[in-house]
Image: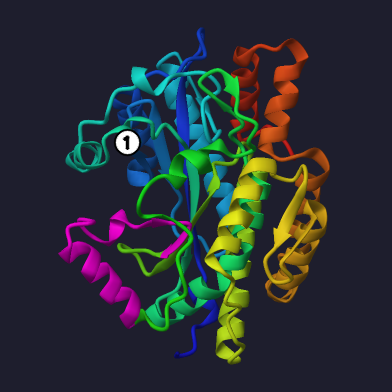
Amino acid sequence: MRETSVEEFTIGVEEEYQIVNAETRELRSRASRILPEARQAVGEHVQPELYLSQIEIGTPICQTLAEVRAELVRLRGEVIAAAERDGHRIAAAGTHPFSHWEEQQLTPKARYVGIAQDYQQLAREQLIFGCHVHVGISDREAAIQIMNRARPWLAVLLALSANSPFWLGSDTGYNSFRTEVWRRWPMAGTPHVFDSRAEFDRLVESLVQTESIEDGTKIYWDVRPSARFETLEFRVTDVCPTVDEAVLVAGLARALARTCHAEAASGKEIEHARPELLRAAKWRAARYGLDADLIDVATERAVPAAELVEKFLAHLRPALEEHEEWQEISALAHQVVARGNGARRQREAYMKAERYEDVVDFIIEETKPGSGPV
């Protein structure tokens, strides 16, 4: 594996938002109206998604977390303004608290029509919203070795970001029910360890040859080498309610990539965690978030969530300190642990009057760039 320069670890963040009716708080299929409005301000940095009640932003390539924050503030603000001019609101949560998938309209693009035809009921129920972090890595071999080593920590990222407790007007009991909806897809989940990029490429070729996928973009793992960009894409997290939490997820993902790259460059052995244990760790993070024990994959023990977050931060601290990001990221992580992730805060909003409309209002307020710290 050749050396990957520090400058290559750029960040790009994609966020999927809900388009909400201002009066009913239901999802509304208005992307065809709102998207052109938003594009007048931000161009191609706003895109359609599977359903017309969804809209996605993607930041430019960023070098620093300050740039990530500024771009998220700008893009959220412009999309919110475009929606408000149409009489609608924007909400950042992994699921809508009560709108039904049966009422959504498919985006009439060939890619989405093909997905709907291929996956049928899975696609019809795919009314979920995520956050994807692209970390720039031009060395294709390095990206595979980083992916191998990142796997044991993905559940911690999920627990911190979990933001989808409600589904079809019910409390699911999960912190991230989005994860459970996504889990059913054949190309979703945590990848196994690859010996080389050549092995990964052979797998993609086999999947295409057997007509299992059309191309590499149809692999939806929790972390994957991007088929379109020279990046490693972290896909495990729910969309975050606040800009602070989105910056936290982006900073943690990049620090994890840098840490894993340093381990690979030093020849450190990969921790070959059993797939069953990784699935259990991810399920527990989706189920409980930060509210109960999580699984420490390295020690194969259940430990308090706050303890595992501290271990994760300690693991990343050298990379964060080297790039002067430790103070910001550790402070944001501790705020989420103390205040609760998005799922806990949604439940707290619901308990005040037991109205799901109030939860939507709460999410809308948190989504605004000026909503303040966690």
Report the label total.
1
In this rendering, is residue 175 above or below 31?
A: below
Residue 17 visible in the current orientation: yes
Horizontal placement of 86 versus 96: left or right? left
Magenta range is 198-224
Seen in the picture, residue 322 relative to 130 is either above or below; the reply is below
Residue named by callout 1: 123
Residue at 37% across, 70% down = 230
Residue at 24% in and 36% down: 116
Q: Quadrant of the N terminus?
A: bottom left
Q: Residue at x 52, y 48 (%)?
A: 71
Image spot of residue 96 (x, y percent): 51, 25
Return the residue found at the far top: 23
In this orientation, which residue lies closer to the viewer: 324 or 186?
Answer: 186
Residue 175 image-quadrant placement: top right
Q: Amino acid at mark 1?
A: Ala
